[in-house]
Amino acid sequence: MNHKNKRMNKTTIRILLIQLFAFATILATTALFFDYIAKNNKTTAFLYALSLIIIIFVSILYGKTIKADRMQLKQVNKKLKENEKLLKTFFNQSPVGIALGEGKYSLIDVNPKFEEIMGRPKKELKETTWVDFTHPDDIQADSDNLDLLYEGKIDGYSMKKRFIRPDGSIVWVNMTMAPLTLEKEVGNHVCIMEDFTEQKKIEEELQKSEKSMAMLLSNLPGMAYRCKFDRDWTMLFVSEGCDELTGYKPESLLNNNEISFNSLINVEYREFLWEKWNRVLKDRVVFREEYYITTATGEKKWVFEQGRGVYKENGEVEAIEGLIIDISIQKEREEQILYLTYHDVLTGVYNRRFFEEEKKRLDESDFIPLSIIVGDINGLKLINDALGHNEGDKLIRIIAEIILSCCDNGEIVARIGGDEFGILLPNTGADEVYKKMKQIEKACSEYRGKKKDDPYHTSISLGCATRNSMDESIIDTIKLAEDYMYRDKLLQSRSLHSSIISSMKTTLFEKSQETEEHAQRMIKLSRTIGKEMNLKDEQLNELELLSTLHDIGKIGIPDAILKKPGKLTDEEWIEMKKHPSIGHRIAKSSHELASIAEYILYHHERWDGKGYPNGLKGEEIPLLSRILAVVDAYDAMTEDRSYRKAMTKEAAIEEIKNNMGKQFDPTIAQIFIDKINESSN
């Protein structure tokens, strides 16, 4: 508008100057005309004519100038209108928010985009101040900048700030403030802003994602990596888990600064991994593999790697990315599970499952002749009953160690049952397997020779057979070996049980305070009572055997209890009272002792029913057990014990008298007392 006024003023001055010039010319011409009339000379006439020509020329020039100025003025007005329309269109259609402000806080005009960004109509924006809808955290910074702008210390400023919409949502904007030099009624600053809320959200999500990724990478149970596709696996990126996995700091592996990752891989896997990666990258599939590495401390670690290639647009491999985790514990568990799947936990030899699978594998002509040895531990049931399953397990382990010591690599030793072993010997003939079987028997005999006090009488019955052609069945070969084994066991059984019982008897005398002399005294005293009661010879023989082995169950009682010098605790008495039951099981396991098993079980019962283990009363107690009870008590009282001195015969007899009808059968007790008194006279 100012430019338009200036141009109009210049045009008016120009017209006035032309008009003055024309007027002066006309005056001069008129004066000359009158002078001509007065003097009527030629000079005057010429000047008059010249003046007239000038007037005509000036009139023409004036007319053209006026016309040109009017045309120019018209064009200027048109251009101004076009610019005004363009400016208005830009203001209203601008993709950024524009506001004109007056003073520090008031807005006098805003464009539609500004309204859209704020979520508020123009009327509301003009009636409030920008402070009313600015986020509280941004008010002070904006106000400080505005102060500097109005103080002329800055030409403008830009900042990121937040506005609050009516619904409470936050909008982020990039805002620029600049001063205006236009007339006062238009305003004195302009505010331009761009909404970047979505970009801010994306940025925040990205930051959150990067933070989460960093957290994830730092907590991964292994090492995330990006590397080149070269034989060194040159690392371009490794996560913090590198240190825990390899013992090296990440920077040590980056660009092979200190060591290449390939150097950590066990030698036997390097070429294999290189070839597999080549196949995987060619097929563009996921790489998965287990291998082991050597850490900075020399520790061997099993690792699992999963990764894939990163490709350029032309299909070339740009890099490899993946994750490597420590699976050493998992691998160890897998090996333990595999071991337990095919091995006997008690002995460490193979189990029946592996034995059966090996039978199938060896069912080929390449392994002919195939020999088989089967064995059955002698007396295991007796050991279990006498000493408990812990002692029985010890015997099984001893036998397994003896067998293994006699076998070579390639010979498969397996525990195929509770007390049974099987040995598969591929490419072994009949003569060789027979020698092997005799070698095992000899080793058992030598072990018994070294262990004079061995209560187990370590022995195993063996049988062997050989498959010489594919026409013969492995099943039939095993059956034949078992038949030979059972025949051997039958021949050994009677003498074996006698040997085991003898060993147990020896062990009893060594463990407890019982002696051979005690047994002989018990036999003499009990036979005296038995004869007085007119017992049959068979009963007298049983009474003699009972007198010798009634406490056989004590071999199953801990030494600490048997040899304790002082009084037993309640818990120790509970253990001690188990020996009749243990002795009963031992006797039941042997055909030689089976007839006295019941007498052993009840030899600590009392006439009044207060004994153990079953609390039998009176004549419910077997006769031989009642006889033994009196004899055993007397001998125990008259012999020194670790916890007391021996009583006199008189005191012992008096004690028996006092317990007649209580602990002892009164009839048997009286007979015993009478016989003792007779022998003393």
Image (tube, rainbow, N blue to C red):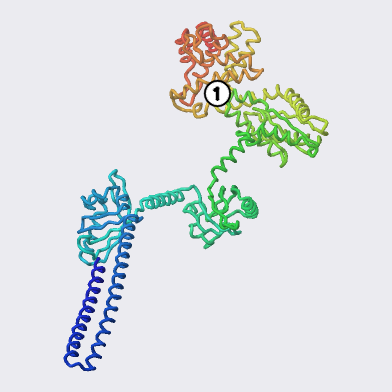
As helix, strand or loop, the secondary structure at mark 1 comes to helix
Residue 545 percent coordinates (x, y)? 62, 16
Residue 81 percent coordinates (x, y)? 30, 62
In this rendering, position of residue 430 left or right of residue 536 = right
Q: Is residue 159 visible?
A: no
Q: Is residue 245 visible?
A: yes
Residue 411 percent coordinates (x, y)? 72, 38
Based on the displayed image, in which of its 4 quarters is residue 190 positioned? bottom left
State whether residue 23 is above or below residue 487: below
In this rendering, position of residue 465 left or right of residue 388 = right
State whether residue 303 is above or below residue 399: below
- The one nearer the camera, 135 or 35, is 35
Q: Which residue is mark 1?
A: 554
The kind of residue tagged 1 is: Lys
In this rendering, position of residue 108 left or right of residue 503 = left
- The one nearer the camera, 30 or 125, is 30
Residue 615 percent coordinates (x, y)? 49, 12
